Image (spheres, grey):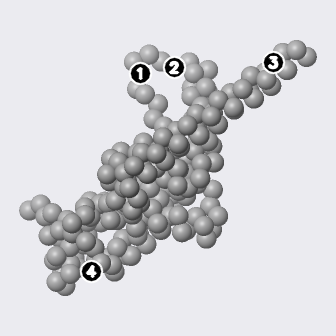
């Protein structure tokens, strides 16, 4: 039988904590992915995932069923990751930019260029302030809607849209300046 999140939470609150494992199985991958994006470390991400589920379980009585459980637990995850980052001053995530599957074999040069571009994009995202970076992760990696991001971060949808727009513009500017610097360096080397 497939239980809804609300049914599982009701059972847990009535003393049947073993049902909580259903929620863990249902959401552990999403929680882990967010944690990994912040830590860029498998063990730290697993620890955070475990801590988030423990914290959520101990706070089930505070869960408001008018919101989606997934939004609530993602908010706990995001807050935990941000707090953890502040405490440990962690270097953050590696954005997972998938290489599109192609029928044609990629040349070594194309593979190198893709890896270099991925590195530059990751570094540019890592330099974003937290309030922008988390939106990029949630939207582009977790595929959350504006509404879900609004609920998770407890900000208006207008703020979500504005910050995401600003984050993209900052990324664009940063990446353009990197390309300009690379072009200057290459031109200088060619003149020698």
| Tag 3 near tag 2, CB within 8 Å | no
**Among numbered discs 3 and 2, the one appearing first in the sequence:** 2
Instruction: Determine the CA span between mark 2 and mark 4.
Output: 53 Å
State the residue position of label 2. 106
Q: Which residue carries the number 1 mark?
A: 102
Q: Is residue 30 visible?
A: no
Q: Residue furthest bottom?
A: 15
Where does residue 179 sit, x and y in percent of width and height?
68, 27
Q: Do tag 3 and tag 4 residues touch (Cβ < 8 Å)?
A: no
Q: CA distance from mark 3 to mark 2?
A: 27 Å
Toward the left, the furthest residue is 1
Residue ID for mark 4: 61
* Distance of label 1 from label 4 (alpha carbons): 49 Å
Identify residue for label 3.
187
Q: Residue at x 47, y 59 (%)?
A: 35
Element type where label 1 sits in the image: loop
Using residue 21 as the reference point, say whether residue 178 is left or right of it. right
Choose the circle earlier in sequence order: 1 or 4. 4
Which of the marked residues, 3 or 4, is nearer the chain's N terminus? Answer: 4
Q: How dense is the environment of label 1, judged by Cα within 10 Å: few (below 14), some, or many (20 and up)?
A: few
Q: Nearer the viewer, mark 1 or mark 4?
A: 4
């Amino acid at each position: 039988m497939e239980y809804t999140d609300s049914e599982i939470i009701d059972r847990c609150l009535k003393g049947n904590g073993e049902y909580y494992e259903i929620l863990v199985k249902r959401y552990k991958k999403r929680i882990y992915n967010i944690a990994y994006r912040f830590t860029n470390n498998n063990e730290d991400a697993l620890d955070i995932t475990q801590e988030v589920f423990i914290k959520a379980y101990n706070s089930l009585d505070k869960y408001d069923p008018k919101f989606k459980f997934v939004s609530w637990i993602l908010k706990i995850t995001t807050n935990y990751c941000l707090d953890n980052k502040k405490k440990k001053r962690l270097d953050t995530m590696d954005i997972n930019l998938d290489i599109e599957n192609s029928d044609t074999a990629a040349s070594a040069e194309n593979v190198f260029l893709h890896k270099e571009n991925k590195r530059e994009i990751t570094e540019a995202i890592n330099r974003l302030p937290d309030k922008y970076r988390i939106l990029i992760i949630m939207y582009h990696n977790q595929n959350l809607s504006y509404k879900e991001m609004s609920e998770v971060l407890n900000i208006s949808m207008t703020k979500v849209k504005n910050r995401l727009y600003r984050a993209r513009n900052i990324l664009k500017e940063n990446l353009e300046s990197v390309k300009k610097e690379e072009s200057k360096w290459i031109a200088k080397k060619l003149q020698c």
